[in-house]
Image (spheres, rainbow, N blue to C red):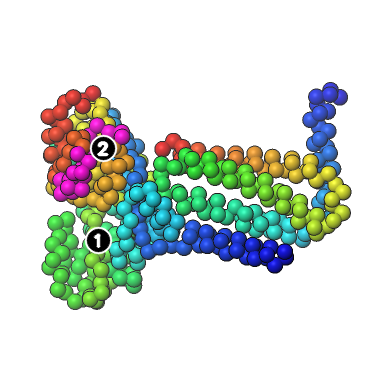
Amino acid sequence: MFKSLTKIKLMLTIGYLIIVSLLVIPSRFQVVLPGDTTLMSDQVSIEDHTISQISSIYVISYEPITLFQSFILQITQQGSVFSPSESTEIMTLTEKYNAAQIQKQSSYIISTIVAYEKAQKDITYAFDGFGVTSLINENRTIQIGDVITSINGIELTQEADFTQFANVETLTIQLKRNNETLVVTHERQPSDLPLALYPMFTLIEATPNITFPGLSSTIGGPSGGVMMTLAIYLAITNQVYDARIVGTGTIQLDGSIGNIGGLVEKYQTVKDDMDIMFVPENQIHLLLEYDDERIVAVSSINDVIHYLDTHDEFMD
Amino acid sequence: MNSWIKKIIDPFNRYMKIQKAFTHQLPTKYVIGAMIMSVIYTLIVLLILILVGANLVIFIQLRTILVMYFVALGVLFIEIYENMFIKFAVKYEPSLSKLNLKLMIGVEKRLLQFVFILIYSLIILQLGVLNV
């Protein structure tokens, strides 16, 4: 009797430990899951102007997932599970967060420049350099958040051509780190990872005055660029839309729209609550299976504005 | 004294008396020992439930349910903790069993649970979890 009780206790303990292990042991995978929308009116504020009901979409990116999470994701068939890239694997959680915030900051300022110039409003800005959002290697000679201003004595402009440094063995990089100017030297190694850089600008003056309360939010990344540009443009040209307009895509200084990650999950996030969804033209194939007429493929901010101009049923 | 005031004050006085006797009879090192043991025991009992909740946090559509789930877990945590605390305390000092510990534990449990829910609600409201 005593022996069998001990046996049961031992089996229960082993079972308990197995369940706890499944709940805590990390796998090598990352998951992207449907998230939520971010209202542009919470992100940007323009003096004496109203922001339309325009939203960008964010997804939940989580790594590493546990074995239990992996099991649940397989059963529910939710999200995309994949191995994280080498460059994200070597970054700490804080570095990833900071990188996403730099991308957002760069994206919001570029959106403002594009929207104001398109609306022919006064805007003055200065180019600061290129913000670093990934690591070359684990040595961290160049860190997340550094703003590179020149390489090998060549001052970088916003149109800088980085291919000129492709075969250079030693890079002498001038950068700004925590308001200090530093010069660092990097010897190229075959194992080096590609560096992700985002152009950084300082907004000197804009009329009407614009502020970004959303910069302090924890949601980061560059994919809200196109919707931010649209929201600012419509506001400063006094156009108000009543429709639930959502979209995703990065914005470049020339107004072109770039690709983003997690497009399918972003669609799943908003599919039940939207009238129009703008997506980058290069990625429309990812959503073809949904056959949704509300999805509009666009390659530039001009395409977005043209679409709205020709569909005035959404106008307030 | 009015009878309804008496009805409120009497149990409170009794609680204070028991509480005083309890802390008088149980040395501080045993109080701390009982607290640590109770926390460890409660964590072992609830660990799987806590971890399941933490694992499900990635599903944003479950956030409201998870907030309620964690409130329930918090209330349950206090329930188990208080019961175990008394059990361990009596184990260290058997003479405590003569006191009406049922009343003491009842009052303390409700107080702790009230404070927990209050703090939790304030944090949630501050973070805007339910308003997103």
SS class, disc 2: strand
Query: Can you give x and y, in whole percent of width and height, for residue A40 in the image?
Result: 30, 37
Instruction: Determine which quarter of the picture holds residue A118.
Output: top left
Instruction: Read off the residue under disc 2.
Output: A246
Chain letter for mark 1, please.
A
Which residue position holds label 1?
A: A196
Cα–Cα span, label 2 and label 1: 27 Å
Q: Quadrant of the C terminus of chain A?
A: top left
Instruction: Give the magenta part as a residue range.
Output: A272-291
Question: Which residue does the image show at 81% across and 32% down from the upper left?
Answer: B9
Q: Amino acid at mark 1?
A: Ala
Residue B47 is one of the magenta-drawn residues: no
Q: Position of residue A27 (x, y in %)?
A: 40, 63
Can you give x and y, in whole percent of width and height, for residue B24 in the image?
A: 84, 52
Question: Which residue is located at x 35 percent, y 67 percent?
Answer: A90
Q: Secondary structure at mark 1?
A: loop
Give the amino acid type for the residue marked by disc 2 in the picture.
Answer: Val
